[in-house]
Image (cartoon, rainbow, N blue to C red):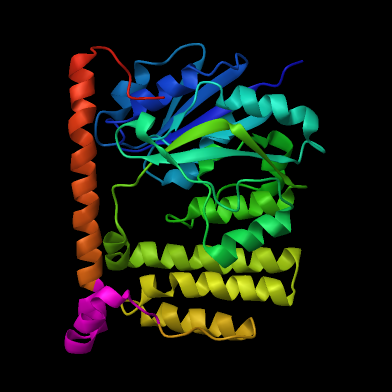
Amino acid sequence: MEPLVSILIPAFNAERWIGDTIASALAQTWQRKEIIVVDDGSTDQTLSVVRQFASKEVSVATQTNQGAAAARNKAFSLCQGDYIQWLDADDLLAPDKIAKQVEALDRCRSNRTLLSSAWGRFIYRSHKADFTPTPLWCDLSPIEWLLRKWSQNLYMPPLTWLVSRELTEAAGPWNIRISLDDDGEYFCRVVRASDGIQFVPEARTFYRKGFDSLSCLSRSKKKLESQFLSLYLQVGYLRSVEDSERVRAACLAGLQAWLPVFYPERLDLVKQMEQLASILGGELASPQLSWKYAWIQRILGWTAAKQTQLYYNQCKSAALRSWDKIPFHLDKQNAPGRKSGP
């Protein structure tokens, strides 16, 4: 029998995007599917939009606001699928994404083979998504995938994966203690529990660039603590697969890449990162800013230079969003009823 695929969507205050996200799930050419949306106590019109899609194929559940991890856990508890497709409330799937990955199942070693896909970043217009291959876009063993991710600070969004129920259950639930980078911690466990990653280049996904910046992260005590916890746990997971010199070097490289995010706002977490680096047999270098801000650092100090860099990046991001938003709305006006999805 053809496998049933569960498309699981956590949603919180996503009224702008959730309709197109559900539409991309419904448009999947793979027919044996169920879609479960869990509204995590939204305070906008998200639930109203979602309920318009309620049907035999689309189930809607609600809960008080507990975070994305708890919403995902609830969605999984309600699903019946042989395979799981995680989908955030602002992202999109190409119509044949799941079908292409299911076709690849014949090449998989077992039910614990993890299927990944190509992904492109976009803001408003998905047809302008930037698909930039990384060293993770190929077939890899679990340890090689984790080494590449950590040593080069790489990323694969949740929607790229297709995960068997067996592998999902082996990895365990999403960690509700982590509000930021919960996907990094979760899929580190999924990869560790797998017997390998099968990359399916024909399968395509569309990852919407976040509207939150690192400046927000630096100002949030809870988010910084969550990010540190995720990094700390992932180091442990990686070393549980292989505790070797190359693994420790990859962990050190990853910690070094994240160090500027915590400095100087959370020197307590910086100290813990330095202690972790010592356990790994190395040490972290002092965080460095881009050369463009070096003169500000010399005159006004590290904090002022970092804030200037964050403000510049925030303004640049806002300009790019505005630039993309104008033709997006023009497209909608010129083609009534046209979806913004792929």
Up/down of 324 relative to 48, above or below: below
Q: How far from the left and from the top, in percent, is residue 185?
A: 56, 56
Q: For this view, does 96 lie left or right of residue 216?
A: right
Query: Can residue 141 be found in the magenta stretch?
Result: no
Q: Residue at x 34, y 47 (%)?
A: 210
Question: Which quadrant: the N terminus?
Answer: top right
Of residues 56 and 325, the one drawn nearer to the viewer in this rendering? 325
Q: For this view, does 205 lie left or right of residue 222?
A: right
Q: How far from the left and from the top, in percent, is residue 4?
A: 66, 21
Q: Which residue is most to the right?
A: 109
Q: Residue at x 45, y 63 (%)?
A: 227
Of residues 2 and 99, the one drawn nearer to the viewer in this rendering? 99
User: In the image, which residues are magenta?
Assistant: 287-306
Up/down of 218 relative to 273, above or below: above
Q: How far from the left and from the top, in percent, is residue 207?
A: 42, 39
Q: Residue at x 47, y 70 (%)?
A: 257
Q: For this view, does 106 lie left or right of residue 5?
A: right
Count of numbered circles on the image: 0
Q: For this view, does 239 lie left or right of residue 326?
A: right
Question: Which quadrant: the C terminus?
Answer: top left
Of residues 186 and 75, the one drawn nearer to the viewer in this rendering? 186
Q: Residue at x 20, y 63 (%)?
A: 312
In which quarter of the view is residue 289 placed?
bottom left
Q: How far from the left and from the top, in percent, is residue 131?
A: 46, 41
Up/down of 307 relative to 201, above or below: below
**Main SS of residues in magenta:** helix
Q: Is residue 329 visible?
A: yes
In which quarter of the view is residue 22 placed?
top left
Q: Is residue 87 visible?
A: no
Up/down of 204 relative to 269, above or below: above
Query: Can residue 294 be found in the magenta stretch?
Result: yes
